[in-house]
Amino acid sequence: MERSFKRALTALDDVFGFLDEAMMACGVDAASAYAVNFAVEEFFTNMVKYEPEGDHTVSINVEREENRLTVRMVDTGVRPFDVTNARAPDLSASLEDRPVGGLGLHISKELLDSVTYEYGKGQSTITFVKTLET
Amino acid sequence: MFSITVGDDGEIQLSGRFDASRVEQAEAIFNRVNSTCKVNFSDLQYISSAGLGVLLKTQKRLSASGHSLILIRMNKLVRDVFRIARFDLVFQIDEEQSPPLKMS
């Protein structure tokens, strides 16, 4: 299943609506569906944050093969931003020293099996894989 | 759908999906908290990193005056995210769990 969305925070409800349909169609268990929602929101909001200009769309493709779910997100007309290179925050820091941001990419990676990033001709592609429980 | 309400006893109730588009709505409540208070997660089915950020920011502000948020009744999926974020180190999290809600 594939659909395109406006690169804007207001599109988030539509993104979740699409993911609900896709998770249902692919028979995805609740824990894996949570992980996919969390990661897609994280990557999508990053795309919005770093490239708020322009009227390009972000396409999201979801495919299941046996017990592996692959999600591919393509963002066009953008500069490179490799999400897999983000520095992990210091999670053992005291409350005063813990930064408020930077947590989402780390958690996404923990919830998923793999995350890969490719860039070419102004196009960012994030592909991630989640092994399903059922 | 996401909603945040404050009960007569001052307990904050979260329900639905707490995602990046709900940060302002949630901050309107959390920014007014100025003493120790419970946050009830029993009807919350989803929280993203944006939601975690709102909670952490509030906790940092409250701790400066010796207060804190106490997080109660999370479902297992939400609890797992708090564990990965290692929020156990910076929040009191009540281990009594709610049954997981269906994503809808």
Image (cartoon, rainbow, N blue to C red):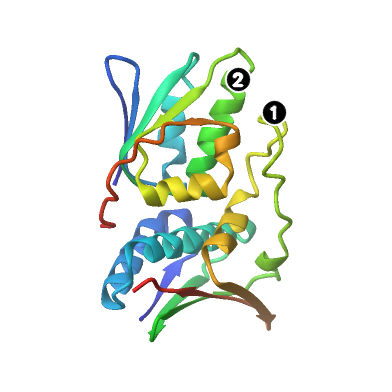
Q: Kindly identify the residue that appears in the image at 68 percent across and 79 percent down.
A: A119
State the mark number for residue A96: 1
Q: Residues within 10 Å of mark 2 (few under 14, many from 20)?
A: some
Residue situated in front as seen by the camera: A119 or A95: A95
Where is mark 2, residue-wise?
Answer: B63
Along the line of sight, which residue is nearer the eye, A20 or A90?
A90
Q: Can residue A26 be seen in this snapshot?
A: yes
Query: In which chain is the residue bearing label 2?
Result: B
Where disc 2 sits, the SS reads helix
Contact between marks 1 and 2 (CB within 8 A): the answer is: yes
**Residue type highlighted by circle 1:** Glu
Residue shown at 55%/37% (left/top)?
B88
**Are callouts 1 and 2 both on one chain?**
no
Give how far across and how far down residue A126 sits, in percent.
58, 74
Q: Residue furthest front?
A: B95
Asked which secondary structure carries label 1, the reply is loop
In the picture, residue A50 is in which quadrant? Answer: bottom right
- Of all chains, the one bearing label 1 is A
Check the image and report above or below for A115 versus A92: below
Residue B54 vs A12, above or below: the answer is above
| Mark 1 surroundings: few (<14), some (14-19) or many (≥20) residues within 10 A | few
Q: What residue appears at the point 57 percent right and 65 percent down from the top-left corner?
A: A54
> Hey, what amino acid is under mark 2?
Ser
